[in-house]
Image (cartoon, helix red, strand yellow):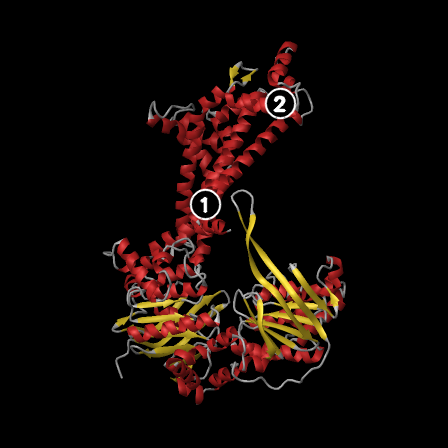
């Protein structure tokens, strides 16, 4: 296992480097116009452009530019020339809101996805299965922006059950934290609940025909134990892979949801920067976002190996 | 005569399927007495496995209808509640399944799965105690280093060891009855001999009553006391070993016995052929590197799948290539056909070197050398029609198209014993034997000179097997074909081969005329292999056992 983790972490470092080079190329080399001018934003003046060129070393060689850019982003002295504020500080401020949103949504979708999937598989063909199928397909089909608007309209503006937008720190008031986040969570999770319950259902139905499930029954295990220990456990392995991919990609989804519910996290910051074509924050967010996805995927791969001994030991035997 | 342990009376099992009701078991009655081994023999679809699984209620579902009675002692199992059945499963009746590869859950350690069986019934047993018991059990079925191996995962066990562990698990709670459903079918003969010996020892030591489900009359002759012969859901004949083997009454039983090939019997005399060599293989090597390393993979070891093999096959003869799993026989076949690139060595076809030829130069040679595969289910694309499957080589080689292609394919289908109207059907509409005929028609399409048949009959029932073997030899005579017949079953190989080559660990350890190799083996491994083959003759089997006991 240790060997697998070390290999995976080294692999991750290589990918992180590739991602940073790619980001650098996309923002500063490929557009084929003066990067300083683009960075200066709407209120560009010749002096500002000149200063930016100096500061980012745009008149130096490409490798040197790359080193300067990484140095600036990771040491936290990137300035948005639009808003005259420190980009990294804004990003750090946004982390609690974005993480509360993404983690909460993930917990909800994993919980209900697995629950619904399990129930439909165990009762396959029955009434409950059919109801859950309808729920899942509806969840998958609803556009997120439309659902957000509907939820806001009925549950916030008309009935005032939930507060309208904003983010409250968990430390300030856990109850309000939940109240403010519940609609964004549901909005984000609902598609995934639908997808995950369908995937798990079909995985479980396949697993039920496996010989080892018959063996488990022949041993005299209770039906519930057969279902949880043998069918569900083995069916969760592909779900973990899926989760790794989807959770990483969630950062993209957070942009829309944070904007609608004005959560003031990284997503909303990205949204504002995009509207204002404010390049430095976009650059930093893309880079940090990509880093997060790579990191998280490495983490999921390790969890995956832990779940499935064939991967772990197969790797070691090689 | 002692009291029956298990009494099955007029058992009927029917399944509702999409194509209607299927009566899998149709009025089966028998008794199982303490300490005996009762063999249920039959071909696929005879209902033998369904009978066995129904005893434990494993066939229960809303699509299944079970009638009749199954009594374990005084307890009725057909109408028992789920909870009552659970108390019987594993505790009073243990079960061993056919495929030890898929019958363990791959994500749990072996020991844990054995312990789970114990703790399912004895809640008071702690995890540690169950683990200790699992080690004892694994040790008792002959797993070396059970203390260590208890924490292995199933994929770290060999097939034979898994089947031993499976038996250990079935015996965890000292059941009165053991049901073994084709327990050795997926194993090599030498491993099969060990498992059968183990079952026999357990049966003797524990006074266990065993139901042995099998299609292999050799296995029956080795271990059974009484035999039930099943056919199409009913028992067509029952009796002790001698009666079934030496004075069978039922025509189906006779048919089964006739279809059995025996390794200790010579094949019908074959015409001797003195012809030119068609294929000459010299020092052929195929190694697979084992790579390992933290960041950069370096080759640390190699699997010597084919390790310096030389032989030749003359025009019109059949060379039997025998070996157990992992001996390298399939890799050798593929390497000869250049489907795998050889590491070194030479393969000459009609005197011409084919190793190292470019893809394009190989293309015309491909039509001369074809392959028939083992699994007639997996080797036909389920979404293609039979006509397309058989006609594809003709189409690819630009041989024929349109109505001419159709005519040629229909001719081929007719030639292998199918009919022209099968052209538009899909593979799932055919039985295993018919599918193998399709595979043969496909191989035959381009009128090849050499056919390598890789275990062509090992997935088939004995009666079907005989038909396919007949077809192969008929085609050989008609088209002057040369065969390399690859199989693990030396009995079958002897029946069809002029010469036999025995493969072991990547090398040919013995080669010679079929009868000589089977009767006067010179190599130790060949002798071991021959000794492990069960002989479908109870007297012979007893004599062999006694001889082994005296030695």
Residue A288 in sight: yes
Residue A304's disc is 1
Residue at point 52% right, 30% down? A289
- The quarter holding residue B9 reads bottom left
Give the residue number, with chain letter if any, for mark 2: A65
Residue A249: tell me if it is visible: no
In the figure, B86 relative to A144: above or below? below
Residue A315 drawn at (x, y percent) = 49, 49
**B480 left or right of B302?**
right
Q: Is residue A25 above or below residue B147?
A: above
Query: For residue B423, which quarter of the picture?
Result: bottom right
Question: Residue B306's image quarter?
Answer: bottom right
Residue A141 image point, x, y percent: 51, 40
Mark on residue B58? none
Q: CA distance from mark 2 to mark 1?
A: 38 Å
Q: How many marks?
A: 2
In the rendered structure, the residue with mark 1 lies on which chain? Answer: A
Q: Tell me where residue B499 appears, x and y as whole percent.
A: 62, 78
Q: Residue drawn 59% across and 24% down?
A: A67
- The vertical placement of A242 against B186, above or below, is above
Q: Nearer the viewer, residue B508 or B331?
A: B508
Mark 2: few, some, or many residues within 10 Å (few <14, many ≥20)? Answer: some
Nearest the eye: B110 or B303? B303
State left or right for residue A187 relative to residue B305: left
């Amino acid at each position: 296992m240790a060997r697998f983790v070390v290999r995976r972490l080294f692999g991750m470092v290589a990918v992180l480097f590739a991602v940073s080079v790619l980001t650098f190329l996309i923002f500063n080399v490929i557009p084929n116009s003066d990067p300083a001018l683009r960075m200066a934003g709407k209120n560009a003046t010749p002096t500002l452009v000149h200063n930016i060129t100096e500061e980012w070393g745009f008149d130096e060689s490409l490798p040197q530019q790359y080193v300067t850019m990484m140095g600036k982003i990771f040491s936290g002295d990137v300035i948005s020339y639009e808003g005259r504020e420190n980009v990294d500080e804004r990003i750090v401020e946004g982390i609690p809101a974005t993480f509360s949103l993404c983690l909460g949504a993930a917990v909800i979708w994993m919980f209900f996805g697995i629950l619904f999937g399990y129930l439909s598989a165990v009762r396959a063909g029955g009434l409950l299965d059919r109801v859950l199928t309808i729920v899942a397909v509806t969840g998958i089909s609803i556009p997120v922006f439309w659902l957000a608007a509907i939820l806001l309209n009925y549950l916030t503006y008309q009935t005032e059950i939930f507060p309208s937008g904003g983010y409250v720190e968990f430390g300030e008031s856990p109850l309000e934290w939940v109240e403010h986040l519940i609609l964004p969570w549901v909005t984000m999770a609902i598609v995934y609940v639908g997808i995950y319950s369908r995937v798990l259902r079909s995985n479980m139905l396949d697993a039920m025909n496996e010989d080892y499930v018959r063996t488990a029954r022949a041993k005299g295990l209770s039906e519930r134990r057969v279902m949880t220990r043998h069918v569900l456990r083995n069916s969760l392995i592909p779900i973990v892979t899926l989760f790794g991919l989807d959770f990483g990609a969630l950062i993209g989804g957070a942009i829309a949801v944070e904007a609608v519910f004005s959560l003031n996290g990284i997503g909303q910051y990205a949204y504002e920067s995009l509207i204002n074509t404010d390049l430095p924050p976009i650059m930093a967010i893309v880079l940090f976002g990509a880093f997060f996805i790579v990191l998280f995927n490495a983490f999921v791969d390790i969890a995956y190996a832990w779940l499935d001994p064939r991967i772990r030991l197969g790797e070691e035997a090689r | 005569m002692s009291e029956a342990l298990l009494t099955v009376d007029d058992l009927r099992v029917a399944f509702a399927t999409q194509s209607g009701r299927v009566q899998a078991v149709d009025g089966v009655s028998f008794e199982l007495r303490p300490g005996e081994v009762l063999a249920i023999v039959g071909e696929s679809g005879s209902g033998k496995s369904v009978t066995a699984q129904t005893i434990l209620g494993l066939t229960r579902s809303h699509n299944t209808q079970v009638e009749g009675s199954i009594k374990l002692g005084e307890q009725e199992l057909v109408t028992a509640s789920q909870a009552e059945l659970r108390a019987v499963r594993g505790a009073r009746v243990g079960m061993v399944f056919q495929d030890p590869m898929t019958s363990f859950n791959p994500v749990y350690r072996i020991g844990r799965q054995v312990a789970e069986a114990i703790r399912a019934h004895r809640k008071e047993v702690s995890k540690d105690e169950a683990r200790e018991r699992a080690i004892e059990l694994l040790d008792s079925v002959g797993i070396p280093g059970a203390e260590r191996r208890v924490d292995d995962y199933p994929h770290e066990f060999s097939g034979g060891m898994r089947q031993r562990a499976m038996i250990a698990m079935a015996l965890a709670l000292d059941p009165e009855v053991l049901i073994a459903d084709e327990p050795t079918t997926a194993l090599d003969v030498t491993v099969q001999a060990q498992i059968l010996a183990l079952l026999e020892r357990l049966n003797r030591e524990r006074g266990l009553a065993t139901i042995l489900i099998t299609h292999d009359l050799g296995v029956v002759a080795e271990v059974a006391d009484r035999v039930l012969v099943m056919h199409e859901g009913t028992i067509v004949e029952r009796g002790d070993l001698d009666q079934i083997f030496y004075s069978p009454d039922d025509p189906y039983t006779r048919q089964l016995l006739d279809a059995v090939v025996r390794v200790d019997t010579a094949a019908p005399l074959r015409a001797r052929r003195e012809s030119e060599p068609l294929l000459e293989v010299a020092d052929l090597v195929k190694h697979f590197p084992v790579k390992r390393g933290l960041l950069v993979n370096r080759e640390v070891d190699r699997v010597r799948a084919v390790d310096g093999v030389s032989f030749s096959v003359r025009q019109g003869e059949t060379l039997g290539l025998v070996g157990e799993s992992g001996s390298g026989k399939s890799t050798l076949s593929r390497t000869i056909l250049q489907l795998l690139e050889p590491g070194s060595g030479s393969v000459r076809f009609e005197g011409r070197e084919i190793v190292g030829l470019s893809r394009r130069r190989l293309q015309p040679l491909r039509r001369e050398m074809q392959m028939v595969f083992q699994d007639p289910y997996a080797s036909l694309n389920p979404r293609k029609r039979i006509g397309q499957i058989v006609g594809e080589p003709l189409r690819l080689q630009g041989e024929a198209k349109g109505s001419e292609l159709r005519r040629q394919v229909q001719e081929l289908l007719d030639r292998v014993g199918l009919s022209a109207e099968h052209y538009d059907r899909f593979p799932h509409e055919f039985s295993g034997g018919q599918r193998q005929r399709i595979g043969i028609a496909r191989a035959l399409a381009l009128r090849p000179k050499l056919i390598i048949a890789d275990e062509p009959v090992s997935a088939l029932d004995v009666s079907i097997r005989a038909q396919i073997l007949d077809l192969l030899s008929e085609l050989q005579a008609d088209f002057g074909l040369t065969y390399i017949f690859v199989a693990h079953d030396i009995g079958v190989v002897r029946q069809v081969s002029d010469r036999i080559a025995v493969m072991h660990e990547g090398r040919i350890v013995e080669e010679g005329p079929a009868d000589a190799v089977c009767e006067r083996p010179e190599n130790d491994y060949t002798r071991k292999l021959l000794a492990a083959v069960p002989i479908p003759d109870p007297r012979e089997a007893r004599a062999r056992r006694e001889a082994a006991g005296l030695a």
